[in-house]
């Protein structure tokens, strides 16, 4: 029996910051101090507070060390693990109060969260099946196979109100019901782990921190619809997630939790992995299935829908990682438990990846109906450097920008759609007053143009024409007629594209036109970027009254565009200026501004 357990984050973020080296040093120091039989070191998944990685938590006292370095390990081992004295200087400062150390759950970042899909992430070793079983893992599968009919399972999901967490929000129970109703000699269960939205890493973190929950849920889905084979389609750029899935599948097969005659019930179900090459369009369900079949990942016309004719032409259900991560807990706790969380039409919780201009970047799981203000100001810690909130982008390239006027909107499927955005898979990128909304729309269109499969003309050609107009606007070369043409193109592409990628591609443009049209007009009419982002419309100016002639700006100008002598005001040659901003950054007297 160990007296202390040290949990070290082994998610992608902390791994990139050196957590494997920390674990190795930790084990060496523990051995050196003779504590091998007293202290266990456990590699976990993501704890959520990615901005503070690498993260280490020491139990039983739950001391939360943040931004740990390899050189900190000897002190932690000798002081904390050997002598029982917490190294206060390395603790996450939000846990340190005048009265002592408070629990992590009471910090601003965690106290409004409710972890369902993420319940095991950062808690267990994802590479040890016994730890998953120790937290109730595979009990839901056992209950389903020994106590329930397939119709019972589907009814529980219908009663829970669980909607797909991959973007569209289609009722999960209804999707399963439609697939069950279709008779076929073969059916399939698929998992979409092809998380392609810029700034999104929710599904990756579940796979890295709790892979067995997805395997268990897929087996439950197979029983419910009458399928014996599942496929997880995961992008190859997620090497840690892929490795842990492989380990989890082999362990589940060894324990007879996948394969033939599971729990001795006669039910057969197995799962295989398929690696995606990073095509955004393969996040669309029919394109994903086409890719699994070994063909070019392009969407198919619907109907028929996958529940009727999906993978290999057979009835298929497809849900994303987060959707599956909720299912075992719904089975064990009952549909009423899940439906009690969230709002009337959006039940349960939602995982978001917070990024952009915000203090606490990372993963959060909140009850549906939590306001955007609560997420950004309380959980996220607000906007850095005293800047003002301007907008939040949800749904990635398929979503829209939420302006400050909707800062208090409760986040759920219907509310976001009503203001021109969407839930999407859960990326939430925060922008402040220094962001140009025209440039933001252009960024997402560049991504969509690059990722379009090219199968249908509205998306292949239309998005490229939209990008051309946006580029003209950011260069100050557009007219108001171009703006009208841009809006017309948006609606044409939205109404005529083959799949969800094309149908939602105009959303970032439409939402910014809706709430920030004045910025578009400033670019066009005044040849000015209000946020000072679009380089073609920028000019840097030196205030002669403030300039002290220190020459620091001239010495740091890469283009030699600043002219002047020592102790005399300088000027900027606009013909040579490359608008890099180095001069303004280096000026100690605030004499340089951009216009």
Image: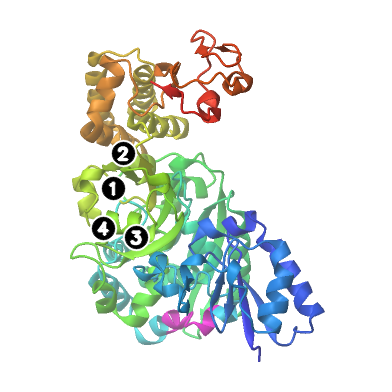
Q: Earlier in the sequence, mark 1 or mark 3?
A: 3
**Disc 3 element:** helix
* Quarter occupied by residue 172: bottom left
Q: According to the image, label 4 marks what residue?
A: 371
Tell me if label 2 and label 3 are in contact, CB under 8 Å.
no
Magenta stretch containing residue 304, yes or no? no
Q: CA distance from mark 1 to mark 2?
A: 10 Å
User: What is the basis of the colouring in this image?
Assistant: rainbow
**Disc 2 element:** helix
**Residue 84 visible:** yes
Instruction: Tell me the crowding category of disc 2: few under 14, some 14 to 19, or many 20 or more residues within 10 angstroms, Cα based.
Output: many
Q: According to the image, label 2 marks what residue?
A: 504
- Residue 378: image tag: 3
Q: According to the image, label 1 marks what residue?
A: 422
The location of residue 88, given as percent across then percent down, is 58, 72
Residue, x 59% and y 81% (percent of image)?
130
The location of residue 56, given as percent across then percent down, is 60, 69
Residue, x 63% and y 68% (percent of image)?
247
Q: Nearer the viewer, residue 36 or 347?
A: 36
Tell me if label 1 and label 2 are in contact, CB under 8 Å.
yes
């Amino acid at each position: 029996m160990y007296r202390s357990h040290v949990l070290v984050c082994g998610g992608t973020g902390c791994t990139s910051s050196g957590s494997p080296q920390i674990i190795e040093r930790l084990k060496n120091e523990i051995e050196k101090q003779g504590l091998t039989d007293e202290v266990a070191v456990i590699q976990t998944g993501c704890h959520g507070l990615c901005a503070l990685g690498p993260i280490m938590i020491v139990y039983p006292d739950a001391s939360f060390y943040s931004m740990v370095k390899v050189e900190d390990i000897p002190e932690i081992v000798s002081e904390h693990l050997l002598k029982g004295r917490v190294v206060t200087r390395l603790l996450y400062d939000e846990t340190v109060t005048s009265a002592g150390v408070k629990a992590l759950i009471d910090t601003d970042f965690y106290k409004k969260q409710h972890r369902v899909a993420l319940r095991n992430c950062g808690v267990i070793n994802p590479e040890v099946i016994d730890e998953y079983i120790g937290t109730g893992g595979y009990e839901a599968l056992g209950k389903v196979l020994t106590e329930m009919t397939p119709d019972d399972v589907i009814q529980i999901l219908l009663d829970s109100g669980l909607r797909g967490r991959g973007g569209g929000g289609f009722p999960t129970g209804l999707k399963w019901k439609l697939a069950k109703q279709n008779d076929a000699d073969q059916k399939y269960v698929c998992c979409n782990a092809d998380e392609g939205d810029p700034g999104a890493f929710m599904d990756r973190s579940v796979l890295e921190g709790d892979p067995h929950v997805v395997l268990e849920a897929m087996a439950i889905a197979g029983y419910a619809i009458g399928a014996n084979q599942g496929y997880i389609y995961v992008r190859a750029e997620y090497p840690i997630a892929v490795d842990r899935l492989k380990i989890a599948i082999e362990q589940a097969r060894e324990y007879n939790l996948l394969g033939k005659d599971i729990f001795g019930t006669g039910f057969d179900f197995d799962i295989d992995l398929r690696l995606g090459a990073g095509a955004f369009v393969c996040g669309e369900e029919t394109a994903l299935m086409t890719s699994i079949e070994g063909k070019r990942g392009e969407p198919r016309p619907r109907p028929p829908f996958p529940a009727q004719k999906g993978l290999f032409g057979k009835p298929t259900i497809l849900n994303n990682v987060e959707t599956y991560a909720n299912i075992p807990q719904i089975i064990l706790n009952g549909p009423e438990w899940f439906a009690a969380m969230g709002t009337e039409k959006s039940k349960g919780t939602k995982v978001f990846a917070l990024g952009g201009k915000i203090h606490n970047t990372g993963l959060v799981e909140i009850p549906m109906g939590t306001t955007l203000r609560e997420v950004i100001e309380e959980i996220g810690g607000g906007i850095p450097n005293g800047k003002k909130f301007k907008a939040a982008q949800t749904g990635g390239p398929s979503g829209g920008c939420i302006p400050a006027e909707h800062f208090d909107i409760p986040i759920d499927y219907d509310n976001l759609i009503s203001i021109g955005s969407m839930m999407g898979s859960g990326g939430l990128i925060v922008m402040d007053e220094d962001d140009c909304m025209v440039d933001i729309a252009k960024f997402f269109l560049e991504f969509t143009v690059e990722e379009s499969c090219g199968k249908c003309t509205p998306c292949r050609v239309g998005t490229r024409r939209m990008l051309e107009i946006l580029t003209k606007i950011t260069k100050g070369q557009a007219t108001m007629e171009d703006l009208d043409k841009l809006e017309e193109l948006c609606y044409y592409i939205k109404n005529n594209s083959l799949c969800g990628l094309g149908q939602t591609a105009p959303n970032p443009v439409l939402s910014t036109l809706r709430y920030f049209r004045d910025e578009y007009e400033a670019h066009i009419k005044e040849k000015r970027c209000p946020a000072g982002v679009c380089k073609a419309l920028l000019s840097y100016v030196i205030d002669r009254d403030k300039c002290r002639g220190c020459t620091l700006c001239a010495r740091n100008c890469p283009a030699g565009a600043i002219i002047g002598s020592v102790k005399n005001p300088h000027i900027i040659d606009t013909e040579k200026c490359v608008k890099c901003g180095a001069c303004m950054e280096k000026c100690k007297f605030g004499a340089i501004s951009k216009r």
